[in-house]
Amino acid sequence: MTWTHAGPALIASFLASMVEFVEALTIVLAVGTIRGWKSALYGTFAGVALLVLMVAIFGPALNHIPLHILQIVIGVLLLLFGIRWLRKAVLRAGGKISLHDEAAAYEKTRIKLSGNGSSVAALDGVAVVTAFKAVVLEGLEVVFIVIATGANGLLIPASAGALAAGIVVISLGIAIHKPLTRIPENTLKYAVGVILTSFGTFWIGEGSGMAWPGRDESLLGLAVVFLVASLIGVAITKSYMRVPEPETEVAS
């Protein structure tokens, strides 16, 4: 397995997983700071345990699905997933919607938890559920990304990319105990939108029996096409820019 073959899956998984880990970490940090670290860690570990169980149960089933069908199904899902990210990234870059702000997301979660009262010493059900939900929702996206980018024998590099992202984000979170606002998350989401859309298109072609010119190297060409198209979209959005709408979602 060469770097040319494994590199795109590793990089795509790393960048996409980093976004999801940052968003989960923001919520867990808010839970731990306001409601106590015991509850936050209980919810986090319970979420991780559920994700591991789901992978252990459903992961082996993928081996029984014909590769071309798996590639098409994953390609379609990945294309929809990537286009969703890319659309929001274009709207953010064009000034149509507000940039995603982890500090604001942290503060929003903190205020919500503070309003329900604080229970730092005892195990807090609200805190446990909040941390659990954040880990499971973001974790499911990480699992999907790893499976999607790791199709066609690239599961190991895709998993390595996600693992590396998790180690980086968790290490930084432990070190500074604050939301990772210095990570250019909006730029990452833009890049990930381009990459996932490219992968989705590539897998649909592969599953349909299409012979891509240059094989894996064609991913770069697809990425350039979607990047250029999205930049045109940004320019058009800016030309019709209105007052930015507040972003209501904490995670994307």
Image (spheres, rainbow, N blue to C red):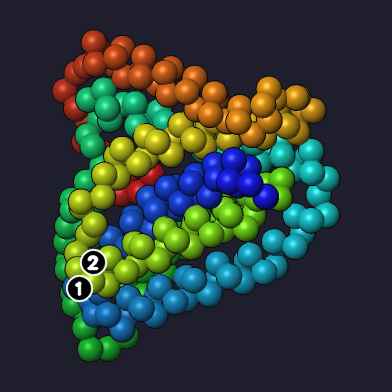
Q: How many marks?
A: 2
Amino acid type, mark 2:
Ala
| Residue at the disc numbered 1 | 33
**Marks 1 and 2, Cα distance to the nearest angstrom?**
5 Å
Most foreground residue, 78 or 182: 182
* 94 relative position to 3: left or right: left
- Which residue is found at the position 54% from the left and 23% from the top? 221
Residue 44 picture location, percent across and down = 40, 73
Query: Which quadrant holds residue 79?
Result: top right
**Residue 125 visible, this angle:** no
Tell me the element at label 2. helix
The residue shown at (83%, 45%) is 66
Q: Residue furthest bottom?
A: 121
User: Which residue is rendered at x = 34% and y = 67% of the image?
Assistant: 170
In the displayed orientation, state which residue is furthest to the front.
Answer: 2
Q: Is residue 83 left or right of residue 89?
A: right
User: Residue 247, how many percent across, how many down?
Assistant: 25, 38
Q: Are marks 1 and 2 in contact (CB under 8 Å)?
A: yes
Q: Residues within 10 Å of mark 2 (few under 14, many from 20)?
A: many
Compared to residue 31, the image places residue 230 above or below, namely above
The residue positioned 62% from the left and 58% from the top of the image is 156
Establish if 90 lies above or below 124: above
Q: Quick one: label 1, few (<14), some, or many (20+) residues within 10 Å?
A: some
The three-letter amino acid code for the residue at tag 1 is Thr
Q: Is residue 206 above or below residue 19?
A: above
Determine the secondary structure under disc 1.
helix
Q: Which residue is mark 2?
A: 30
Q: Position of residue 1 (x, y in %)?
A: 67, 50
Q: In this orientation, does residue 191 appear?
A: yes
Give the x, y percent position of residue 56. 67, 69
| Residue 165 numbered mark, or none | none
